[in-house]
Image (spheres, rainbow, N blue to C red):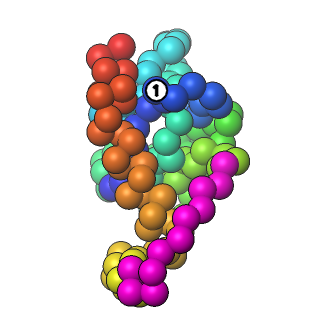
Amino acid sequence: MVGQKNNFLGGAKLKIIAPKHPRFERFLKASQYKKVKETPTTITFEGIFSLHVTRDFLHMKKREFTKFCRELKVSGGRVVRKGDSLYITAYLRRKVSFKLSEDEYKLLRAMAKQAGVKVSEYIRNIIVNILAKTPEALSMEAT
């Protein structure tokens, strides 16, 4: 399971309206998503980072997971289900570029390959994880 954290930078937020499910709710809270609304059947959270959660992690049967995924609503991003995995991704609108030496790039490419992702995705995951551990992000967890 992969998850990254909440909005301390301002700007567009992911808004997730999900059927009530205790493990999914704990996952979102642990990922520093903020609960903004609750009804008898749904719960609404806001955050900025992309998320990945599996059916096994949620302890759901296949039909229950399928129904859960169909009922999930996201604004500011998209929901993609691939088999037993659910991906909630923010729209990516900003680009960052920098240069590396040939040796640095070879090392980075090897590390990304070992992780099974593209170089750009590998770098993005590292940066997002660093951002999520900043004092600004950690202070948002308590709100």
Q: Is residue 18 visible?
A: no
Q: Is residue 51 left or right of residue 25?
A: right
> Which residue shows up at 36% across the image and 29% down it?
137
The crowd level at tag 1 (other Cα within 10 Å; few <14, some 14-19, many 20+) is some
Residue 111: x %, y % from top left = 34, 79
Q: Nearer the viewer, residue 78 or 84?
A: 78
Marks counted in the figure total 1
Residue 28: x %, y % from top left = 39, 34
Residue 46: x %, y % from top left = 52, 26
For the record, the magenta segment spans: 94-105
Q: Quadrant of the C terminus?
A: top left
Q: Is residue 113 above or below residue 36?
A: below
Q: As shown in the figure, which amino acid type bears the numbered disc 1?
A: Phe
Q: Which residue is mark 1?
A: 8
- Is residue 100 shown in magenta? yes
Q: Is residue 76 left or right of residue 131?
A: right
Q: Nearer the viewer, residue 75 or 12?
A: 12
- Is residue 36 shown in magenta? no
Q: Is residue 122 above or below residue 73?
A: below
Q: Quadrant of the N terminus?
A: bottom left
Q: Nearer the viewer, residue 70 or 104?
A: 104
Q: Secondary structure at mark 1?
A: loop
> Which residue shows up at 58% across the image and 49% down it?
89
Residue 95: x %, y % from top left = 65, 55
Specify the principal SS of the magenta part: loop
> Which residue shows up at 53% across the image and 36% down it?
48
> Which residue shows up at 55% across the image and 65% down it?
98
Q: Is residue 76 visible?
A: yes
* Quadrant of the image occupied by residue 74: top right
